[in-house]
Image: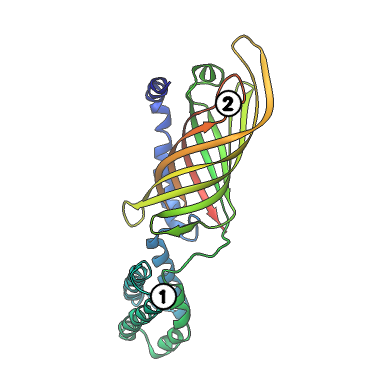
């Protein structure tokens, strides 16, 4: 079975590669829309967001902004290291964070006007609390996907095609909970396979564990395992024209890897779906997604 999947993936690789130019083409759109991001942005994105927000609040000039960005982002990096240090107490962390912001304020004093420094003082406490802190507990996001699916079962391929295309949707009602080893998130995931009147629809509430590795300042690689119960609705005619159709409850399990740039994601997922029909719907799914966060 594994050999069949590999051979079929190689046979159809030219079609799946069509998603890569689309991924590259969407990168400028992501850069032009900095307010869009994934439900759990990278630390680099968080640092940029805070320095941009502070620049807007202080009303800095174009000449001041680069220095403010540099000082604030360097301070946030120090704060992140402090917050992740498990060898010191919470009180010590607060004291060290306060000192980090004292150093940043001294550097900013050389760049900002007296009025801007007064504004900075008015929000110092909020800055110290926000730097490297936890994300809000409720921050929903919706992801729209274009999928190419490579069924592992030869009979399924004969009925639905070697790599049927589809549109998928994922909804995350909350932001993910992070720790030093990774992050856990809950989501509602859907995908559909359609071909020549045959169709499969899967709806699955899932819990996912994800690890991320920065590739560059704006590009992140991720590895994820996810699973949960699934509602499976299928209707198809087999090779002898016998019709099969039912609505069943089962489970879905996925192993994913991919790349993210802002709200744009390119990924490969191997899905396992409970066999509720004479054929199974396991397979390799290549996806291009755009995620909106609220």
Q: Where residue 53 sits in the image (x, y, percent)?
A: 46, 72
The disc placed on residue 275 is: 2
Please tell me in which quadrant of the rendered image residue 196 appears: top right
> Horizontal placement of 199 versus 63: left or right?
right
Viewer-nearest residue: 11 or 204: 204
Q: Where residue 266 sits in the image (x, y, percent)?
A: 43, 42
Q: Which residue is drawn at 52% across and 50% down?
A: 291
SS at circle 2: loop
Give the mark nearest the N terminus, 1 or 2: 1
Q: Which residue is drawn at 64% across and 22% down?
A: 197
Viewer-nearest residue: 75 or 251: 251
The disc placed on residue 90 is: 1
> How has the structure been colored for display?
rainbow
Foreground tag (1 vs 2):
1
Q: Where residue 192 sits in the image (x, y, percent)?
A: 59, 33
Please tell me in which quadrant of the rendered image residue 12 appears: top left
């Amino acid at each position: 079975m594994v050999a069949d999947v590999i051979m079929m993936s190689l046979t159809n690789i030219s079609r799946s590669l069509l998603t890569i130019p689309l991924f590259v083409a969407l990168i400028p759109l992501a850069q032009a829309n900095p307010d869009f991001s994934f439900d759990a942005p990278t630390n680099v994105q968080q640092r940029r967001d805070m320095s941009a927000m502070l620049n807007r609040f202080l009303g800095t000039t174009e000449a001041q902004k680069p220095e403010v960005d540099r000082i604030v982002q360097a301070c946030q990096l120090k704060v992140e290291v402090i917050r992740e240090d498990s060898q010191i107490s919470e009180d010590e962390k607060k004291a060290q964070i306060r000192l980090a912001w004292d150093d940043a304020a001294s550097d900013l004093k050389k760049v900002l006007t007296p009025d801007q420094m007064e504004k900075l003082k008015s929000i110092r406490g909020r800055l110290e609390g926000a730097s490297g802190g936890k994300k809000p507990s409720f921050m929903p996001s919706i992801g729209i996907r274009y999928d190419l699916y490579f069924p592992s079962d030869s009979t399924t391929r004969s009925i639905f095609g070697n790599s049927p295309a589809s549109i998928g949707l994922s909804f995350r009602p909350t932001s993910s909970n992070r720790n030093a080893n990774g992050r856990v998130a809950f989501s509602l995931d859907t995908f559909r396979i359609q071909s020549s009147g045959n169709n499969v629809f899967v709806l699955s509430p899932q819990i996912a564990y994800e690890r991320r590795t920065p590739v560059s300042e704006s590009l992140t690689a991720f590895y994820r395992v996810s699973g949960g119960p699934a509602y499976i609705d299928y209707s198809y005619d087999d090779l002898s024209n016998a019709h099969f159709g039912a609505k069943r409850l089962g489970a879905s399990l996925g192993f994913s890897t991919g790349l993210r740039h802002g709200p744009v994601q390119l990924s490969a997922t191997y899905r396992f779906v409970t066999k509720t029909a004479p054929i199974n719907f396991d397979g390799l799914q290549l996806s291009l997604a755009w995620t909106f966060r609220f």
